[in-house]
Amino acid sequence: SPENIAEDRRIIEKDVRPVWGDRKARTITRGDVAALLDEIKGRGAPVQANRTLTVLRAMFRKAEQRDIIDANPCAGLERPTTEERRQVFLDDETIRSFWLGLPTAKMMEISRLVLRLVLVTAQRKGEVCEIEKADLDLDRGTWFLPGRKVKNRRDHLVPLSPLAVDLLRQAWALSGGSSWLFPSRTGGGVDPVKGSSINHAMRNNRKELGLVGMDAEGSMIEVAGAVPTPHDLRRTAASNMTAAGIPRLHVDQLLNHVDGSVGAIYDRHTYWPEKQRAVAVWEARLLDIVERREPDSNVVSMTGSGA
């Protein structure tokens, strides 16, 4: 995207050109690249060193493909630091920025709907992308996920809040004659939209969605510990449910997490009322956040009972 190109250019201008100047690409050695990365890491920016290696590797790969250089000097170099995926949780203000930024973000309408549904239903991105119309009963507010579509291979029935039903009806109206609720725009609706497309849509619009800020030098900075992904929307929904008083067991049932304990083996309770309550509490909380309303005291007291 233009935004990614601008960020790559910024890395080159800030960290590469001041060191290498106008040297010819053919003169750059693996040792030169390693020394540059060590210098960036040494100033306390190990993640930036990783980003620089990524940009240089791609740049030299292009040069190699065009016979500008004989070999990529980045070949065989390991990333300067190991980045662990951090547990990202969107705070209220970021949730609001994300939700209100979606209508004007540069992405397909189905991408907007998928992202909103992940946040509203707390289900996995891939499961939302692969919703089949036959699995929905919008009048009764249910979404059936057969085990063949689910990570743990266990049938899962998802209660749908009024907001979720409204989003699903919008998607249905856009889906044409496809059996998929979110058909890919290529292939005549034979396949569902790819999860990678949703990832790209969210990442390419991270600034517009309030998921990153800008520092004094014009560089993007993370606002939630790392740039959020669609999976972090699911985590955010779950975290808000438990914060509102929904027992972790009930949230796990809604998320369709597997409980391998001995007690779980003999527990045949469907937890349907508990899952319905969880999505109702989360919808009320989400609307409070988006509309900057004070939480309904009745909802708070209700979630406190039976916890």
Image (tube, rainbow, N blue to C red):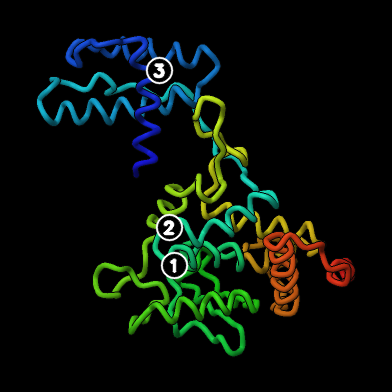
Q: Are marks 2 and 1 in contact (CB under 8 Å)?
A: yes
Q: Please state, as top left, top right, bottom left or bottom right, where the C terminus lies in the image.
A: bottom right
81 relative to 96 in the view: left or right: left
Q: Amino acid at mark 3?
A: Asp
Label 2 crowd bin: few (<14), some (14–19), many (20+), radius 10 Å: many
Please, what secondary structure does the residue beneath circle 2 have?
helix
User: Closest to the observer: 246 or 95?
Assistant: 95
Q: Disc 1 designates what residue?
A: 129
Q: Amino acid at mark 1?
A: Cys
Please identify the quarter of the rendering in which residue 275 is found.
bottom right
Label 3 crowd bin: few (<14), some (14–19), many (20+), radius 10 Å: some
Q: Disc 3 designates what residue?
A: 15
* CA distance separating discs 2 and 1: 9 Å
Please, what secondary structure does the residue beneath circle 1 have?
helix
Residue 252 position in % (x across, y down): 68, 63
Residue 307 seen in the current view: no
**Residue lying at 57% horizontally and 65% vertically, measured from the top left:** 123
**Residue lying at 35% horizontally and 28% vertically, measured from the top left:** 9
Please identify the quarter of the rendering in which residue 247 is found.
bottom right
Which circle, 2 or 1, is nearer the viewer? 2
Q: Earlier in the sequence, mark 2 or mark 1?
A: 1
Q: Amino acid at mark 2?
A: Ile
Label disc, if present, on residue 198 of the rendered structure: 2
**Residue lying at 43% horizontally and 57% vertically, measured from the top left:** 198
User: Closest to the observer: 225 or 102?
Assistant: 102
* CA distance separating discs 2 and 3: 31 Å
Q: Are marks 3 and 1 in contact (CB under 8 Å)?
A: no
Residue 236 position in % (x across, y down): 65, 55
